Amino acid sequence: DLKSHPALLAWYNVDEPNGNLLPIADEAYQIYRDNDKHHPVYVVSCSPAHFKLKNNMCDILGIDPYVITVSDPEPAFYNIIDWFKVAKAENGTKSIWGIPQSHGIKGGDLIQPTTGQLKCQAYLEIVEGAKGLIFFNYNSDNVLTGAQSNPVLWDYFKTLNAELRGYVPAILSTDEPDFKVSSLTPPIRVLVK
């Protein structure tokens, strides 16, 4: 019985459901909920325009604003901020998990990040409200270059995860400070708890 397995964190509903997969994902969510009240259901959306559509099919919304590309030598990290604003506005009190880009696509526009770019994405997603991070590291000889194909990046995950572990109480806290931090130029993103 999988729902009793100690390694089960959440059920993963349909991957990035859109179009004709939406009713299937809605139905799958109800099946998960009817059979296991103790584990959340997680779904990923790859488009801010679809975030609101995911409300009925998950307990946790995962978003993957991949920003490290060949065509843009300056990663569009501000897209992460925009995606989280939309997700928070359209998904109410649901938890949001970020999916920092850690892979590339062979012959495509997405490329693997540097360790600094991976760290920047992770921290920015946390500052913007992520309550968890998932790293998609699948490796395929034909299409995807997962992090395990890059020994430096793969090894860096141990360092990054150990560093982030120390911040878990602040990441999961619901306390809000009674002051705001702001800047004019350049924009600075801050999480205060």
Image (cartoon, helix red, strand yellow):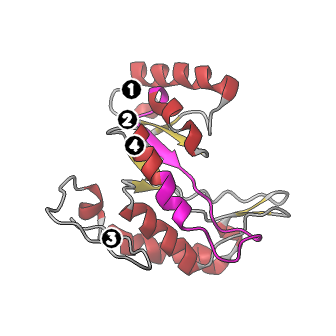
* Residue at figure coordinates x 40%, y 35% from the top left: 59
- Residue type at mark 3: give it: Val
- Residue type at mark 4: give it: Ala
Residue 177 seen: yes
Question: Which of disc 3 and disc 1 is earlier in sequence?
Answer: 1
Query: Foreground mark, 3 or 2?
Result: 3
Which residue, given by chain and number where applicable, does mark 1 sit on?
36
Element class at badge 2? loop
Element class at badge 1? loop
Which residue, given by chain and number where applicable, does mark 4 sit on?
89
Question: Which of disc 4 and disc 1 is earlier in sequence?
Answer: 1
For residue 39, the mark is 2
Does 163 sit above or below residue 137? below
- Circles 2 and 1: CB atoms closer than 8 Å: yes
Question: Which of disc 2 and disc 4 is earlier in sequence?
Answer: 2
Element class at badge 3? loop
- Residue type at mark 1: give it: Asp
Give the Cα distance between marks 1 and 3: 37 Å
* Residue at figure coordinates x 55%, y 59% from the top left: 135
Give the Cα distance between marks 3 and 2: 31 Å
Q: Nearer the viewer, residue 1 or 82?
A: 82
